[in-house]
Every structure is written in structure tokens, then in C-alpha cells.
Image (cartoon, helix red, strand yellow):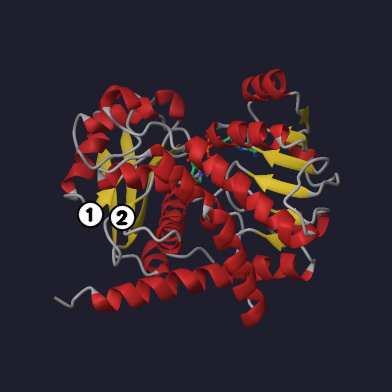
Amino acid sequence: MEQTIFSQIEELEHEQVVLCHDKHTGLNAIIAIHDTTLGPALGGTRMWNYTTKNDGITDALRLSRGMTYKAAISGLNLGGGKAVIIGDPATKSEALWRRYGKFVNSLGGKYITAEDVNTSTKDMEYIHMETKHVTGIPKYMGGSGDPSPFTAYGTFVGIKACANTKWGSDELSGKKILVQGVGHVGQYLVEHLTKAGAEVLISDIDEKKLKETVDNHGAKVIAPNEIFDIEYDIYAPCALGATINDESIPKLKCEIIAGAANNQLKDEDIHGKAIREKGILYAPDFLINAGGLMNVAAEAYGVYNEDKVTADVEEIYNRMHLIFDKANAENLTNQAAAIKMAEERIAAVGKIKSVL
Ligand code: NAD
């Protein structure tokens, strides 16, 4: 049975959800603010041609909850929010971004935006014409630029932590790794993995991006509908969410799932448990892909320093080990252990917030 929007908001415990429409630009956007206990809600804006508008709303709600956990587990003083623009990315225009920027501005800093799927530093530049509550703006404007290289680097160190836990060594040389999605993040991840000596397989629905990645790194291409038919050591989802589901789990022939995509588990509880029972080590998505958020957070704090951000991103390695230990000690899935750790920080910091 399809859930109503309000029942989803109640179930996931959102603070505020804003529906935005503009007839002149054709803008249809959802800004979902999940939790601002730790600070303003920072999260990117995704543009996607959803099958239905309700699919877009559901995506914004799920993604914004993930941002709350991502900021909390990464030690950031930020809340969780995310926005979705429903539409064909080919129809992007200056006016659309500026109109959207006005909606972001109307929230007075409670929500701060950045890049996500199908949005770029140039789009952030347009948003910046209407609001200061935007990060990931181009470097030539004094911003921190595209967060994707930091997301990719964090995912890479997180994959090493998984290898260490599973095989007793960080070594990725000779390991077969499938990267699904070679967009902004995936292409940088492929570069790190190739340099580390891994045998990289790639899959994408965009022929141009596949060709670029093959030309630059020599990776082998797998057709999107064949990725669960073959065997590899690590599956790195770097496209959209919910690829770990009832259909893919029985077919999966890997030992580790560790990638940058948000909301990889279609159902966190059911599918988190199913892959654990299969003996697959899962890297909680909002923990391993937090590098980009750390980068835009530094820009939002006004104290951007690339070396400091890089050191923070490398901490993902230790945090992954902490989560794996917690999951084992408390007999939880890795995702559940990560959520628990994030919720513990929100609760603890929340309690001291009202003290003068
Ligand atoms: P992107 O749009 O640049 O790249 C996504 C790629 O996935 C595209 O090349 C697209 O063609 C491909 N794709 C879409 N559907 C596919 C399918 N069925 N099979 C194979 N490939 C498919 O987006 P991105 O910025 O690289 O983000 C990738 C994922 O990582 C998203 O889930 C995003 O939310 C998440 N993420 C990104 C960042 C960041 O810094 N960009 C940070 C955290 C999380």
C-alpha cells in the first residue's frame, strides 16, 4: 500500500518539508529538513526525472534522514537535510536555479544546499546569486568546489578498512572491484582503486562516461543488467540507491559492499540483515560517503583548509573499524550500529544544548 506523504514524514520524524513550485521556470522542488538538533541542515540538491512526483518526495525524505546520520557520525555540527528537483536535468537553466535559490533563502539558513546527482558547481554559482546558504560553490568564487573527490577518497579509505576487516590487510592489489556508476564520485574512485592495483570493472548507463573512464583508466565494462550475474570481491555502488534488494541479494557473489551511493539498502533492516546472513561485509553508506559533506561543511563553517579536510576524511578508516566492532559487540547489522552511534551523539549533544 502506498504511504501518504504525511505518514512518511511522521515515520521518519522530519521537522519540516517544503514543497516548492514556480510556473515560470517549471520548478518543482522538495526541501526536506530532517533534524536540526546539531545545527543547520546541510545536504545537496538532486535533480532527477522521477517517474512520479511522490517518488521524488520519498527520495528527499529518505536522503535527508541519511544526512542527519552522516553529519552526526562524522562529528559535524550540522543537521540533516536534502532537496530534490523533479525534472529532466537537460532542462536546467539559470532562472530555475535562481528561483530555487530564493526558496532556499526563504528558510533563513535552516537549510544549506550543495551538489548531488546531476547538479554542478556552476548550478551552485547560480543559487549563490540568490542566497548565501549554499556550499560547494566554485573555487574561483572562494568556495571549496566539487565535493566529489573527497567523497571518493573517503570511500577509498573505507574500502581499505573493509578489506582489512575481511582479509586482514588493506591491500587491494589484485582484488576485483565493480564500481557501479562512473559519474562525479565513481570516476575518482576508479582512479584510486586502479592506482592501488585493483582489477576494476565498471558499469554505467551513460556511454560517454564509460568511454572516458576506459580511456583514462583502462577499466573493463560490464552491462548494467549483468552486474549481479558475475563474481567479484567488492561491489561499490556509486550510482543511485536501493540496489541491494530482494532481487539482487540472492545473486550477489561478493564479500564486501562498500560504495558512495546514498541509501544503498532498499530496506535498511530486512536487507541489512540479509546481506549479513550471507556473510557479506557492508560499509554503512552514510559513514563511508561522508567525505564530500566534510568538505562542504568546512566551507560552511568559513574555515576551509584542504589538508585538514583530507585528514578528517582519512578518519573514516578508524570510524569504520569502530562500527564493525560495535556491530559485533551488540549483535547488530553494521547499518544499525552506525545509526545507533549517530543517534547517541545527537541525543547526548541535544541534552547539553539548552545549558547556558
Ligand atoms: P553523478 O550523477 O555524477 O553520477 C552517477 C552516475 O551513475 C552517472 O554516471 C549515471 O549515469 C550513473 N547511473 C545512473 N543509473 C545507473 C544504473 N542503473 N547503472 C549504472 N550507472 C547508473 O552522481 P555522483 O555525484 O557521482 O553521486 C553518485 C552517488 O553517490 C549518488 O548516490 C550520490 O547521492 C552519492 N553521493 C555523492 C556525493 C558527492 O560528493 N557527489 C556525496 C555523497 C554521496
**Residue 256 position within the rendered picture, expressed as x and y whole percent measured from the top left:** 74, 55
Q: Which amino acid does label 1 sit on?
A: Lys
Which residue shows up at 44% across the image and 40% down it?
A: 116
Q: Do the residues labelled 1 and 2 touch (CB within 8 Å)?
A: yes
**On the rendered image, what quadrant is the N terminus found in?**
bottom right
Above/below status of 350 relative to 282: below
As helix, strand or loop, the secondary structure at mark 2 comes to strand
As helix, strand or loop, the secondary structure at mark 1 comes to loop
Name the residue beneath numbered marker 1. 110
Above/below status of 209 relative to 270: above
Q: Nearer the viewer, residue 260 or 145?
A: 145
**Residue 321, picture quadrant:** bottom right
Which residue shows up at 34% across the image and 27% down it?
A: 138
Tell me if mark 1 has few (under 14), some (14-19) or many (20+) residues whose alpha carbon lies within 10 angstroms of its own: some
Name the residue beneath numbered marker 2. 41
* Residue furthest left in the image: 356
**Residue 24 position within the rendered picture, expressed as x and y whole percent measured from the top left:** 24, 29
Query: Is 21 displayed left or right of 217 in the figure?
Result: left
Residue 75 is marked as none
Q: What residue type is labelled 2?
A: Ala
**Residue 340 position within the rendered picture, expressed as x and y whole percent measured from the top left:** 50, 74
Q: Which of 318 and 146 is in front in this view?
A: 318
**On the rendered image, what quadrant is the C terminus found in?**
bottom left
Q: Earlier in the sequence, mark 1 or mark 2?
A: 2
Ligand 1 falls in which quarter? top right
* Residue furthest bottom in the image: 330
